[in-house]
Amino acid sequence: MPGAVRREDVPAPRGPQRVLVVTAVAPERDAVRAGLAAEAGTEVEVRAPGVGPAAAAAGTATALALAGSEGRPFTLVVSAGIGGGFAAAGARPGDLVVADRIVAADLGSQTPGTATGFTSVAELGFGTAEHRTDPALVRAVAGAVGARTGPVLTVSTTTGTAERADELSARHPGAVAEGMEGFGVAEAAAGHGVPVLEIRAVSNPVGPRDRSAWRIAEALDALTAAMGPLIRSSAGAPPWT
Ligand SMILES: O=C(O)c1cccc(C(=O)CC[C@H]2O[C@@H](n3cnc4c(=O)[nH]cnc43)[C@H](O)[C@@H]2O)c1
């Protein structure tokens, strides 16, 4: 169209970076804060509104609305925490993963008689069951922190059997990890037009429940180590808004 201004011709606003990091629980929040202690030049706020997608969405939306109303909007939202890793994708305790898609893996309907026995809300025609993260941003951050990338699943019930792990892997090929908050954080970020990332430090394999095998301290250390590189690499990535 003659005279039209193309989106790529408009310089993206590059004001100060303000990042909201959302974890589930206090030990994750403290691990994130420990990794940010030496960061300068970026304002980062860390909140831990609770476990599960509903608490995550409510806490994230509240923080975004408050910041916006005070004229200091966030430029990036990060869902961060420990999580279960899919062994089939090579995600082992202590590893880091960054989501290329944030998927609500159990938001839908059981549908006996279909190929997978499950129909997502998107397939049912009720909104979305996943959020895509910006590929350039994901590449930059995953490279900087040394993470694998792939779909990260959000579940309301943690996986506790090999059968369920296989079912999720089959339904979401390439899934690297599961957690309980990412999709809630992403829904709130999307509602406010702010880009989102999800990073998980693997504390346990997705599969048969064995709480004694969780490597929580190792995962929290990995999360701490990732935060500085995450913040620096997200500030240096190409404009994504
Ligand atoms: O007991 C502790 O010291 C402790 C310290 C930090 C975090 C916890 C949690 O229990 C966090 C719960 C949080 O972790 C995610 N998570 C971890 N593993 C899985 C999994 O296999 N499947 C799904 N979610 C997982 C989840 O996001 C929870 O919110 C305890």
Image (tube, rainbow, N blue to C red):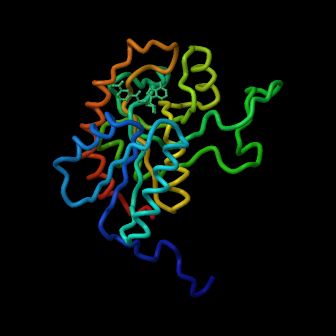
In this rendering, is residue 145 above or below 126?
Answer: above
Q: Which residue is at the far right?
A: 113
In this rendering, is residue 33 above or below 217?
Answer: below
User: Residue 6: percent from the left, percent from the top?
Assistant: 53, 76
Looking at the figure, which quarter contains the C terminus? bottom left
Residue 53 appears left or right of 196 = right
Quarter of the rendering containing residue 14: bottom left
Which residue shows up at 56% across the image and 32% down it?
Answer: 155
User: Residue 120: percent from the left, percent from the top?
Assistant: 70, 38
Looking at the figure, which quarter contains the N terminus? bottom right
Which residue shows up at 55% across the image and 22% down it?
Answer: 159
Which residue shows up at 63% across the image and 25% down it?
Answer: 170
Quarter of the rendering containing residue 226: top left
Q: Quadrant of ligand 1?
A: top left
In this rendering, is residue 35 above or below 3?
Answer: above
Q: Which residue is at the far bottom?
A: 3
User: Residue 47: percent from the left, percent from the top?
Assistant: 37, 47
Which residue shows up at 52% across the image and 54% down it?
Answer: 188
Name the residue nearer the viewer: 187 or 135: 187
Residue 157 appears left or right of 237 = right
